[in-house]
Image (spheres, rainbow, N blue to C red):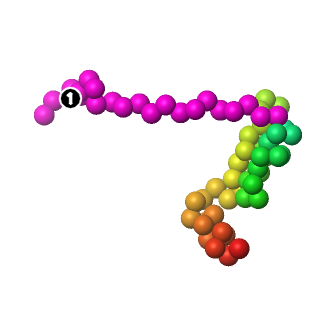
């Protein structure tokens, strides 16, 4: 075994750049399980419950 990697084996996934939203746009866009986080420099959309399994349990409860 060597410590060399194949030159073509690294596949980089491209992600879309973040969408710049105003506070009004963010408030129109969010779902019931999301919150808008506002800082002096940015407006962010966040899930209220961060844990995926906890979100699934809440969704089942209704």
Up the image or down, 9 lies above or below 57; here it is above
**In the image as oriented, which residue stretches furthest toward the bottom?**
61
Q: Is residue 52 visible?
A: yes
Q: Which residue is mark 1?
A: 3
Q: Position of residue 58 (x, y in %)?
A: 66, 70
Query: Is 52 displayed left or right of 28 in the figure?
Result: left
The front one of 7 and 31 is 31
- In the picture, measured across the screen, residue 22 lies left or right of residue 50, that is right
Q: Residue furthest top?
A: 7
53, above or below 28, in the image: below
Secondary structure type for disc 1 = loop
The quadrant in which the C terminus is found is bottom right
Question: Residue 24: horizontal and vertical position, in percent?
Answer: 86, 40
Q: Nearer the viewer, residue 28 or 49?
A: 28
Q: How many marks?
A: 1
Q: Position of residue 53 (x, y in %)?
A: 56, 64
**Residue 1, image quadrant:** top left
Q: Which residues are magenta?
A: 1-22
Judge whether 16 appears above or below 34 on screen.
above
The magenta stretch spans residue 4: yes
Q: Is residue 39 visible?
A: no
Q: Give the overall secondary structure of the magenta segment.
A: loop
Residue 48 lies in quadrant: bottom right
Q: Residues within 10 Å of mark 1 (few under 14, many from 20)?
A: few
At x 15% / y 30%, what residue is drawn? 2
Q: Depth check: give the residue in front, 4 or 20.
A: 20
């Amino acid at each position: 075994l060597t410590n060399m990697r194949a030159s073509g084996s690294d596949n980089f996934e491209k992600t879309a750049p973040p969408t710049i939203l105003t506070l009004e746009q963010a408030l129109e866009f969010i779902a019931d399980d999301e919150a808008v986080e506002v800082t002096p420099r940015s407006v962010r959309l966040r899930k209220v419950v961060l844990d995926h399994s906890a979100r699934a349990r809440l969704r089942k409860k209704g």
